[in-house]
Amino acid sequence: MGLAGFVSTASKVIAATWRHGSRLLLGISVGCYAAAFVLWLGAKLQLARADELWSDYGIFLILAGTVFGVLAAVKNYAERQNTKIVLIANEQESLWVHTAQPDGSAFTQFSLRFHVANMDDGALHLSKVRLDWPWISRRRIFNALVVTQHPEQNLYGRGFSIRRRSRRDCSADILVLVWLVALKDASR
């Protein structure tokens, strides 16, 4: 594992930690308050050096606990604001297929089945599918279609919205060009 692998792994760990950053900040806040409480209790019980440590670090730990607690509350509020839609995968009906074409190109098709829960107070309309892969450019996505179940009938289409505080079946089909060997050979 070289430097690039280390940086990639470190960035993934930081991103995963920050995704649930309110929990991390709350943990730091509780840790500061716990350390301050232990120092205060040690000073009250007249343990060796506890009075000196309490006078040196007690106010800092209480202020740090308060600051991290406020940041945790703000981050928790921001995380809850982003939870307006919940995707529930239907793994039994989802599939992907990788096929080689006669011209040397290779396609991967994703057929995804899932439920969408609309947690917002307004109607929601799924308009497009985005493939979030850094190594696949948008030019290589040939077809992307998302359809939603009708609110009252067993029909699927692009124009149906998901009512507020409800759940609907959805389907997404994506066709991606993975590589093109024929163009590389033709350019020689």
Image: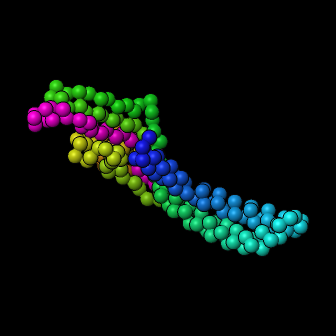
Q: Would you identify the image quadrant in which residue 178 lies?
A: top left
173 sits left or right of 56 in the view = left
Residue farthest along the right direction in this orientation: 45
Image coordinates for residue 24, horizontal then vertical, percent: 60, 56
Image coordinates for residue 53, horizontal then vertical, percent: 78, 69
Instruction: Identify the residue shown where x is 42% and y is 43%.
Output: 2
Total numbered labels placed on residues in the image? 0
161 sits left or right of 46 in the view = left
Instruction: Identify the residue shown where x is 69% and y is 63%.
Output: 32
Instruction: Identify the residue shown where x is 44% and y is 40%.
Output: 1
Quadrant the C terminus occupies: top left
In this picture, is 8 found above or below 123? above
Taking the image as drawn, is residue 64 in sight?
Answer: yes
Region in magenta: 162-188
Q: Would you identify the image quadrant in which residue 77 lies?
A: bottom right
Query: Is residue 186 found inside the magenta-colored segment of the image?
Result: yes
Query: Which is more toward the observer, 166 or 137?
Result: 137
Image coordinates for residue 172, horizontal then vertical, percent: 34, 40
Query: Which is more toward the observer, 110 or 22?
Result: 22
Image coordinates for residue 85, horizontal then vertical, percent: 46, 52
105 sits left or right of 121 in the view = left
In this picture, is 28 found above or below 134? below
Taking the image as drawn, is residue 8 in sight?
Answer: no
Query: Is residue 131 found inside the magenta-colored segment of the image?
Result: no
